Amino acid sequence: MDRKNKATGAGTDQEGKKKPGRKPMTDAEKKAAAKARAEEKSKAANLKPEVIVQFQDVEADVTALIEEAKADFHKTKKRTLVTDMKLYVKPEERAAYYVINGEHTGSVSY
């Protein structure tokens, strides 16, 4: 064995042995894994994060504020659909101001 073969390990008995690692998956395992991955992707695509604003020992759940703003809006505009909404949270005033559909404004306190 020359110097080059020693460095690369060529010409040794280990060439015929299989390397340790994962066993190949069966068709049923592949289908189950694909289904699980598809469920994860669906869940990730429909992610609705929970956002909480904290300021001076007060917490405001943004999702709850959005629902309150929609309810407040629908008190005056019962049949108007909410297609666009901007919510401005002002923790120092303990209020959230909203603009719905670019023209209707209001506020909710928490």
Image: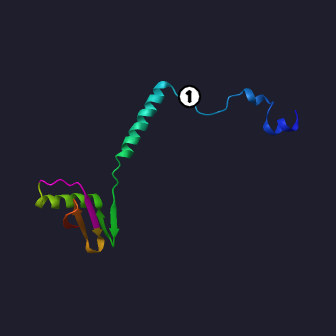
Decide if residue 92 is on the left or right side of residue 71: right
User: Looking at the image, is 93 positioned above or below residue 40?
Assistant: below
Q: Quadrant of the N terminus?
A: top right
Give the percent coordinates (x, y) of residue 47: 35, 49
Give the percent coordinates (x, y) of residue 70: 19, 58
Mark 1 neighbour density, 10 Å: few (under 14) some (14–19) many (20 or more): few
Residue sitting at 33 percent across and 65 percent down? Answer: 53
**Of residues 70 and 104, which is closer to you in this image?**
104
Q: Secondary structure at mark 1?
A: loop
Residue sitting at 25 percent across and 57 percent down? Answer: 84
Q: Quadrant of the C terminus?
A: bottom left
Give the percent coordinates (x, y) of residue 79: 12, 53
**Of residues 80 and 17, which is closer to you in this image?**
80
**Of residues 80 and 57, which is closer to you in this image?**
80
**Which picture quadrant has residue 104?**
bottom left
Quick check: is 53 in the magenta stretch? no
Q: How many marks?
A: 1
**Which picture quadrant has residue 50?**
bottom left
- Which amino acid lies under the numbered mark 1 shown in the image of this protein? Pro
Magenta-colored span: 79-88
User: Looking at the image, is 66 positioned above or below residue 25?
Assistant: below
Can you identify the residue that label 1 sits on? Answer: 24
User: Looking at the image, is 70 positioned above or below residue 5?
Assistant: below
Residue sitting at 81 percent across and 40 percent down? Answer: 7
Residue sitting at 46 percent across and 25 percent down? Answer: 28
